[in-house]
Amino acid sequence: MDILFSRNDSLCQRVKQALHPYDVWLVETLGEFKPDVIWLHHHGEDGLDKRVANLKDVVPDTAIVVLSNVPGNKEGMSVIMAGAQGYMNSFARPDVFRLVRDTVVSGHVWLGQSLMLALVAQLGNVAGIGNTLKEQGLNSREEELLRCLSVGLNNQQIAEQLSLSEQTIKNQLSALYKKYGVKDRLSLVLAVNNMQREAEYKRYGEDA
């Protein structure tokens, strides 16, 4: 069972039809509900990220998807950082709603490509990807690929940067996903970041 927070009647009908046969309840407050997914329609009000964080505190195991009439990377980053599992256009096709639901219920995050690349670049910059890659047993091509990911390049841009075909880049990314046990570039950057931090802690401990 899912719940939807929205004051837009037409959106409510579209969401219910798109997610059939799943039950979608239109509510004003969370109350005692323990839904599988909370669909939170953004009406342009302030404090969206705080609302997401508050909901996550109350139902930490429930996936939250924010629906925005005018989605943007800045807003998307803020709600994902606040704990949302998905951020999407309110006017998406019905099949996209179902795909988003399947994605977040399975424990993954749903982001549009633009937001995904921007978030990867932000995390890559914060993590300083590339500083300790050699310590992780990566070859030179894998290092180049990770550095391209960490600045937010898409597959086509990486292919142009490395003078390779886009299909070759996809194959090499798939190999890296398998190597780190992840399924997307965001998870890959996070995994590399975690391993770099572990290496730095270990090195710091040895130098102490």
Image (cartoon, helix red, strand yellow):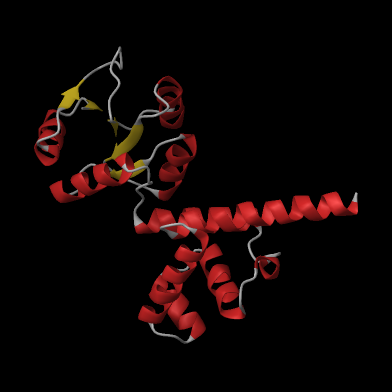
Residue 202 placement (x, y as % from top left): 78, 52
Q: Residue 77 placed where, x, y %?
A: 46, 44
Q: Using the image, determine if residue 150 lies above or below residue 193.
A: below
* Above or below, comparing residue 108 to residue 59 in the picture: below
User: Residue at (14%, 46%) from the top-left corner?
Assistant: 94
Quadrant (top left/top right/bottom left/bottom right) for the N terminus: top left
Furthest residue in direction bottom, as rendered: 163
Residue drawn at (50%, 83%), measured in percent from left and top? 162
The answer to which image quadrant residue 67 occupies is top left
Q: Which residue is situated farthest in the top direction here?
A: 31
Left or right: residue 194 compared with residue 52: right
Let me know if residue 35 appears in the view: yes
Q: Seen from this angle, which residue lies furthest right?
A: 208
In this view, the residue in front, 140 or 147, is: 140
Report the residue at 72% width, 56% height from top: 199
Q: Quadrant of residue 86?
A: top left
170 over 189 or under it: above or below: below
Left or right: where does residue 135 sit relative to residue 121?
A: right
- Name the residue nearer the viewer: 88 or 129: 129
Residue 104, image x, y percentages:
32, 42
Residue 201 at x, y = what percent? 76, 50
> Is 192 on the left or on the right of 164, as rendered?
right
Total labels drawn: 0
Question: Can residue 70 be seen by looking at this rendering?
Answer: no
Left or right of 191, for residue 107: left
Identity of the residue drawn at 37% across and 42% down: 107
